[in-house]
Amino acid sequence: MAQRYGGEFSPAGKPSPTNGSPPRSPFDGKSPTPMGARVNALFLVPLPLAVMAFFRGPTDLVLSLGGVALMMAAAWMTREGMRAEAAYESRKIARRPGLPRKIVGAVLMGAGIGLAGLVDGSLLIATLLGGVGAALHLGAFGIDPMRDKGMEGIDTFQTDRVARAVNEAEAHLTAMKDAIKRARDRQLEARVDVFQATARDMFRTIEDDPRDLTAARKYLGVYLRGATDATVKFADLFARSRDAGARADYEQLLDDLEANFAARTQQLLSDNRTDLDVEIEVLRERLAREGITSD
């Protein structure tokens, strides 16, 4: 009977270094990316128009290529808007995107279709085509988040500090992920994904309580920067030499980092629970002094 492979070098072959429990999946905390076939199709739609433009007169050529350029810009802007929305949705506390990219993308798409429509139609027809194109774009991709999330009653100065720190930490994780790809080893990439999922647990904990930022700043800055630098050096070395000793040392580094991040996250959660218990006890004492007691 077939059995799942779980040997020494399997990505899921070792227990979690943090608590001995079954290893985390690299997909923990992730959701499917919205930048799928629909967004990619936007880059393909203008291509036939670009080819046909070279079989027309000079004026029609300029109008057609101008429409293609605007539609390509709309596709790029929409993709960036989808990426910004995904980042917004992944966080419990987030500000709305500063630039409504998907809305701008819809306007550019309408303008591009309208400009291309001038080739074979009147200004009225081109305007109608552009309006329909912009409306269909908004219907397919929606609009950008238009309000801040989870910031009611929260000190905006503190949340801004947390947002900047988390953005810098996410940049380190992105650089780390890009670097390990140069090692051309799927198991190492999966191992880095597991560590990043543990690091993002800390990010979410800090976003829930911005007061935790001071206690965790070293982890978001110094430790992640060091992990990224180590990953860059290891990936370059391993891509050339496939050194098993260097690989073992790097995996041990990830184990140690993951254990430290997980332990620190649990400590932050414990501190938050302690603060809550203290506040509840103080409130009970005040109510008792007012003669209000629970059954």
Image (cartoon, rainbow, N blue to C red):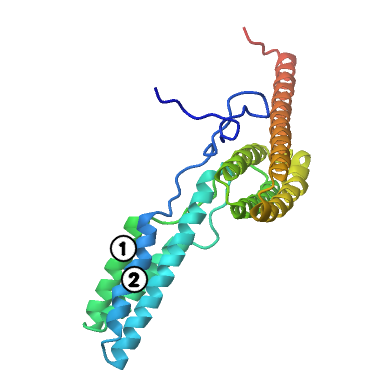
The secondary element bearing badge 2 is classed as helix
> Residue extending furthest top?
295
> Residue extending furthest bottom?
58
Quarter of image, res 134: bottom left
Q: 290 left or right of 57?
A: right
Using the image, determine if residue 76 lies above or below residue 167: below
> Residue at (45%, 66%) from the top-left corner?
76
Q: Which residue is mark 1?
A: 135
Q: Which residue is mark 2?
A: 110
Residue nearest the observer in this picture, 119 or 19: 19
Q: CA distance from mark 2 to mark 1?
A: 8 Å
Q: Are marks 2 and 1 in contact (CB under 8 Å)?
A: yes
Name which residue type carries label 2: Gly
> Residue at (27%, 67%) from the top-left corner?
132
The secondary element bearing badge 1 is classed as helix
Residue 131 position, x and y percent, is 29, 69
